[in-house]
Every structure is written in structure tokens, then in C-alpha cells.
Amino acid sequence: MVFIEPEYEHSHLIGGTLSNVFGNITLRGETGFSVDRYFLSSDVINNQGIVKRNELAYVLGIDWNAPADILFSTQLFKNHVLNAPDSLIQETHDTTLTFLIRRSFSNETLISELLWISNTTYEDGLVRANIRYELNQNVNIKVGADIFYGNHSGLFGQYKDTDRWLFGINIAI
């Protein structure tokens, strides 16, 4: 019989963020460096399936507040596992792109949104569309859909056969 006892190990993160507004355009950036982060490994004999490595991650983004209450936003996410062994289960370099378009109507009581998240490393992603209507400041109604696609080994592709429709009512008390 095999007994598994999960443990949580602390990791250390140092990072920074920046942003600047130029008229109706906002440029954003964030970076983080993780020291001794734990990753899954296929080498279960020598290191019990876990390796400790440093990781550098960053995100760059740009937002454009266009006329007619439209927001266009895009982001680039990059992760790099430093000195990764061949036994590392995940990819050592990971890239994800996001694209968002949001439009508000009727004095921001009706908001439509389309979000596309694309991971170029695993060739998978998510397309999310929704519409939210604010009945008053305490109640809003939302309807939408999540469509997953891509490779089953990716974060989003593993759900590609489980697209979903959403309907919700949020009540703030």
C-alpha cells in the first residue's frame, strides 16, 4: 500500500509592476522572479516527482479606451523555468496571449464582453462571451458561454469537450 502525505512548501517571489497612461491608451507591465519554486517531474525515483527551480515570469499589456464606450485590451504572458531538467513535466517556456473587447451601453447598465485566451505553447485556449445587465446597483443578470479548444495536455484544451453556457444573477446585500 502507498501512502501519500501532501505538504505545502513556501516559495519566495520578488517582482514589480509599472503602468503609464498616454491619453486613452494605458501601457502595463509586471514581472516576478520566483526562487525555489516546486515543479512536477517525471523522475519519481531520484526526487519523488518534484524539482525545485527558479522561474521568471512577466506580462505586458496595452489598453485602448476607444470612442463609443469600447475597451480593447491585449496582454502577453511569458514564463521561463530556469535550468529546467529534461524530466520537467511542463514546458520550460510558456506563452499566453489575451484579447478583450468590452462595450458598455445605456449609461453602463448593459455590458457586452468577448475574451480570447490563447496559449501558444500548448496550442489551446478559451473564448468567453457574455452580456451583463445591471438592474440596479445591487442586482445584475449575466448570460454567456465558454468555448474551450486545443490540445488535451494544455490548461484549456483538457476541457475542449466541456463547453458551457452560463446564466447568473448576482445580488449584493
Image: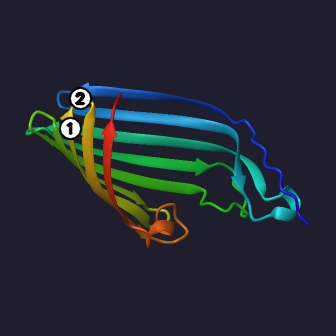
Front-most of residues 165 and 38: 165
Residue 83, position in %: x, y? 69, 51
- Circle 2 SS class: loop
- Displayed quadrant of residue 68: top left
Provide the residue designation for mark 1. 134
In what quadrant of the picture does the N terminus appear? bottom right
Provide the residue designation for mark 2. 137
Coloring scheme used: rainbow
Vertical position of residue 131 compared to residue 2: above or below: above
- Circle 1 SS class: strand
Whether residue 125 appears in this view of the structure is yes
Residue 125, position in %: x, y? 41, 62
Callout count: 2
Vertical position of residue 165 compared to residue 97: above or below: below
Q: What's the residue type where badge 1 is placed?
A: Glu
Task: Name the residue at the right extreme.
Answer: 1
Identify the residue at horizontal 87%, vertical 60% (top origin).
46
Vertical position of residue 53 compared to residue 45: above or below: above
Tell me the crowding category of disc 1: few under 14, some 14 to 19, or many 20 or more residues within 10 angstroms, Cα based: some
Is 30 left, or right, of 140 in this rendering? right
Identify the residue at horizontal 27%, vertical 48% (top origin).
142
Q: Could you give the CA–CA distance between mark 1 and mark 2, rounded to whole angstroms?
A: 7 Å
Is 156 left, or right, of 12 in this rendering? left
Residue 169, position in %: x, y? 30, 44
Identify the residue at horizontal 30%, vertical 51% (top origin).
99
Q: What's the residue type where badge 2 is placed?
A: Gln
In what quadrant of the picture does the C terminus appear? top left
Front-most of residues 75 and 173: 173
Q: Are marks 1 and 2 in contact (CB under 8 Å)?
A: yes
